[in-house]
Amino acid sequence: MIRVLGPLVRGALLLAAVLLPSAWPAGLARPDLVLLVVAGVALLHPPPVGLLVGLAGGWLVDVVPPGAAPLGAGALVYAAVGLGLGAVRRQLVLSPVLPWVATGLAAALVLGVRGVAAAAGVGRALPGELAWTLAVTMLVAVLVLPVVMRLERWMTQRGWA
Amino acid sequence: MPSRTSLLAVLLLATTAAVLVVDLARPSLAAPARSAVAAALAPAQRVLAGWDDGRVAELTAERDALAAEVDRLRAQARDVTELEELARSSTAAAVDRTLLPARVVAVASGSTPVGGRTVTVDVGGEDGVLPDQTVVAVEGLVGRVLRVAPTSADVLLLGDPQVVVGVRFGEDGALGDVQADPVPGLPARGHGQLTLTALGDTRIEVGDRVSTLGSPDDVPYAAGIPLGTVVAVDPDRGQLGRTAVVEPFVDTDTLDLVAVVLREDG
């Protein structure tokens, strides 16, 4: 029963990550908070857990207004991020900087998919916008990633997750 | 235990992939789900987008209404002078419009696989908003309504690849269209800039004003709404029709108060 609490907290975190950009000042590049939550969880658990959290986060990005089309594309990309970060988590314990670097690579991958899709004629993405989103995400990650990871560790110790 | 998690992960992954395929084939099937989520989360988004004392919103709405009135009267005056030439089928003068003020409460994520330009506004079906209605700001055209939920609506912004607007430009009101994606081979566009393609052989001059051409019943775009100005004319690289760079009047990155154009008789 207590194991339900972990997923509930993660769900609440993801929902907050999707909704909070509404309060972000207009005109400023928005950080990818969902990716940071997915990374924070995926870096501490086996790949399937990261995959599930990535799926949930991606689904929220896809359906919470204004949402994204096609439905499910975001979910698959974030799931890949969760799976990938979960798979390499043991190699990242060498230095506290490595999780941040890996998260940056994951953010670059997500934005890269958007850039490639735009280059292929699906959607629109300007290189400058992608670069700004990546920079702001990395900057916010310095604060958010350790907080999410600490919360996740705490929940694991208490048997919540 | 891990095997159960893996099984669940694989199952959900397969479901997601299936939904993706179905959504690519029939995007309308997802409408009820999107609408339900929108209805559930609209209050939270409204709160997060910020409080205001109502006075600002009221005055801005008034200003928008007056600006729209000026645009309408200008269009009307132009129509009157040009009526003898039996020129354009502008509906600007014929249709009385009402503007429904709205606030932007959410902006599309910048990291989704397919880059689109959408925002959510805090008015919806209960306020009389219908899909494909025009959305304007005081400076000019913002976009059109894409999806409508009971208390919120998603707006497709100018600059989204799906948005192609029929326009008039220049002194004579020559016809053309404005869209985000430039023809391959043309100089790169700056942030937010759009491409004007002239129909026919009209010359495009730097500084030409571009405004919407309008469609029957104002759907999806009402007529005579200012869109932008021409800031550069492209060299001839063999593209069909002359093209130029248009700087829109509205900066879609800093949108806050907008208005949905409702038809008086609608």
Image: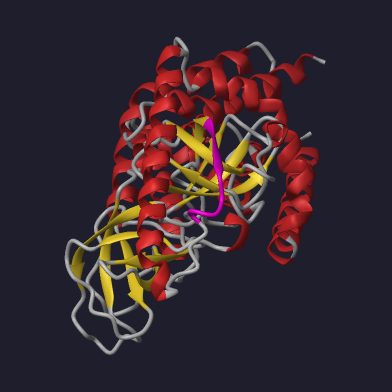
Q: Is B95 contained in the magenta span?
A: yes
Q: Is residue A44 visible?
A: no
Residue at position x 33%, y 68% in the image? B173
- Residue B140 x/y as whole percent: 37, 46
Q: Magenta stretch?
A: B92-101
Picture quarter with the N terminus of chain B: top right
Residue that sits furthest to the bottom in the current view: B238
Q: Is residue B252 above or below residue B57?
A: below
Q: Is residue B51 visible?
A: yes
Q: Position of residue B182 (x, y in %)?
A: 34, 71
Residue B2 percent across, percent down from the top left: 74, 37
Q: Is residue B70 above or below residue B90?
A: above
Q: Is residue A154 left or right of residue A107?
A: right
Q: Residue at x 72, y 63 (%)?
A: B21
Counting labels gives 0
Q: Is residue A128 magenta?
A: no
In this view, the residue in front, B157 or B249, is B249
Q: Quadrant of the C terminus of chain B?
A: top right
Quarter-of-image position of residue B130: top right
